[in-house]
Amino acid sequence: MLNDLARHSVDTVAFRDRIPYVLDLLAGVTRTIDAESGGQRTLDFSAWWSQVDRSAQRSMQEMRNAELKELVSRTAAHFDTNIVVRAADYPDLRVSDGDTVTRISWAFEGGPLHGKPVLATLRDYLLSVGQLVDEAERRLTP
């Protein structure tokens, strides 16, 4: 879903439609670890789990709740337009000399992630929860 969100970053409607669901999935990782580990926790897991910093998860949860429950957008699109560009300055794009290039980036607006770039922040969080899942699985194994 995060890759799908990134593919739609140039379409403001599609991006806004998808962001709540990506936030929901990411915020749900620690909830899932907590729920699925119940009844099978090792002492090692319990000691570790009680020390896990969940502040990033709380931030994701807060953003998710704003988007899904309160219908408050916590993202803003930023448009950077350059006119009469040189094609050589944009090797990653199919442009010709003299074209106009507009790039759209997204940042969180309000809340605990205010000002952070949306896609980079979500990718970093996905990486961290992936590591959290790996560690949880390792510690749940007797």
Image (tube, rainbow, N blue to C red):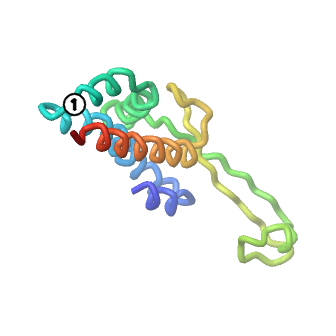
Count every numbered label the image shows and give the total.
1
- Residue 84 in the image: state x and y as whole percent: 86, 67
Front position in the image: 57 or 73: 57
Q: Residues within 10 Å of mark 1 (few under 14, many from 20)?
A: some
Three-letter amino acid code of the residue under disc 1: Thr
- Residue 12 in the image: state x and y as whole percent: 52, 54
Q: Is residue 116 left or right of residue 88?
A: left
Identify the residue at image location x=80%, y=78%.
Answer: 96
Q: Is residue 46 left or right of residue 123?
A: left
Quadrant hosting residue 14: bottom left
- Residue 113 in the image: state x and y as whole percent: 54, 31
The quadrant of the rendering that contains the N terminus is: bottom left
Front position in the image: 46 or 28: 46
Rendered view: 27 above or below 105: above
Give the residue at the far left of this rendering.
39
Q: Is residue 69 left or right of residue 57?
A: left
SS at circle 1: loop
The quadrant of the rendering that contains the C terminus is: top left
Q: Is residue 51 left or right of residue 35?
A: right
Give the residue at the far front of this rendering.
142
Identify the residue at image location x=45%, y=46%.
Answer: 126
Front position in the image: 23 or 82: 23
- Residue 44 in the image: state x and y as whole percent: 29, 28
Residue under label 1: 42
Identify the residue at image location x=44%, y=25%.
Answer: 55
Rendered view: 94 above or below 60: below
